[in-house]
Amino acid sequence: MRVLVVLISGFLLLGPGVAFAGTAPDPGVAFTISDRRINESSGLAVSTRHPGVVYTHNDSDGSAAIFAVGPDGRTKATLTLSRAHNRDWEGIAVGRDQSGPAIFVADIGDNAGGAQPYVTVYRVPEPARLSDQTLSATAFRLKYEDGPRNAESVLINPRTGRLYIASKQIGGGLYEAPAQLRTDRINVLRRVGPAPLLATDGAFAPDGRHFVIRTYYAAHIYSAPGKLLRIVSLPHQEQGESITYSPDGRSLLAGSEGVNSPVYRLGLPDDAASASSSASSSQSTPQRDPDTREGGAGVRSAVLLAVVGVGGFFAYRLLRRRS
């Protein structure tokens, strides 16, 4: 009962500008990851070159490998990254490099709570043909302007190519990388908006008008940093740590750690789906943090999201104990 009170209070505090949708329309299993090597799937990204294929990877201390998974849940190719190390890979996104589509995998986990002076994002070209192969990785070092923190979410805006990371702790933030990542220096991540408590993954919609940041229990959909549009509850998962948009932007794909883990497809309400977005193109390019721009409005948003997050976390733990 106490958990429900916290949840309800949190939803009411969000106010009339934010809709809580309950479970997204028509949730169902899109596919089940059948490769037993994939036992800690911690990120999802849809291929831009191979229809029906999504990329995923394992969590900390796994191999430095990306798995290309087909619509039947079977692994179509294993992409091994040379000159890369899986310290704590937590997210993946598809963007571009100078020659075409590229895959970015983020070594951004920090369970020690600030022990890492910088984090690393690796970039490899997305192969034109899917086969087991080794790809040479380009490494980018990044650090937060306000000190080290734990994170599990990496996003790339398809309109601008800019990379973002969402931190995981209370009062979490969305951090923007420089427009051009450099290999010869540490790139500084600057906070541009709040992020929900216990953020475990994120992704931009294919048209760049919306982005989503998920927690263990819900998907938070934004039209711009600090502009929360809708919260969509997710199906119960063993340890939900991945999310991305379908290629048409009308659905979310949500995955979990664990062997033989299902990936759910959740249809989005019309106001949150890419095709029906009314957001302007300027909204897809984040500005500076609302905390400094709007007299603390961003702080209030972060606090309200934290209330929802805390309630959701305890509800999630309660459900796991009962299952």
Image (cartoon, rainbow, N blue to C red):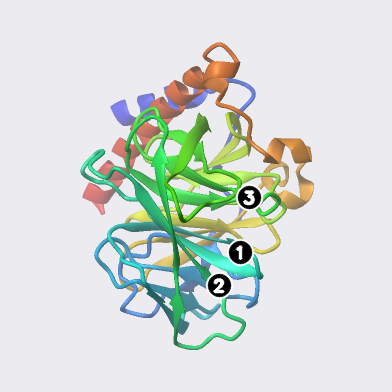
**Residue at (45%, 75%) from the top-left corner?**
136
**Mark 1 or 3, closer to the camera:** 1
For the residues bearing labels 1 and 2, Cβ distance under 8 angstroms? yes
Where is residue 295? Give x, y as percent.
56, 11
The type of residue carrying mark 3 is Asn
Viewport quadrant of the N terminus: top left
Instruction: Answer yes or no: is residue 237 visible.
Output: no
Judge left or right: residue 152 versus residue 24: left
Residue topped by disc 1: 97
Sequence order check: which comes first, mark 1 or mark 3? 1
Residues at marks 1 and 3, CA–CA distance in whole angstroms: 13 Å
Q: Is residue 113 above or below residue 262?
A: above
Of label 2 and label 3, which has the lower sequence position? 2
Secondary-structure class at tag 3? loop
- Residue at the spot of label 2: 125
Looking at the image, residue 15 sits to the left or right of residue 85; the answer is: right
Q: Quadrant of residue 81?
A: bottom left
Q: Residue 157 bears which disc, if any?
A: 3
Residue located at (47% from left, 39% from top): 189
What amino acid type is highlighted by mark number 1? Answer: Asp
* Coordinates of residue 145 in the picture (x, y in percent): 42, 32
Whole-number angstrom distance, CA of label 1 to CA of label 2: 7 Å
Mark 3, Cα crowd under 10 Å, few <14 / some 14-19 / many 20+, is many
The mark nearer the N terminus, 1 or 2, is: 1
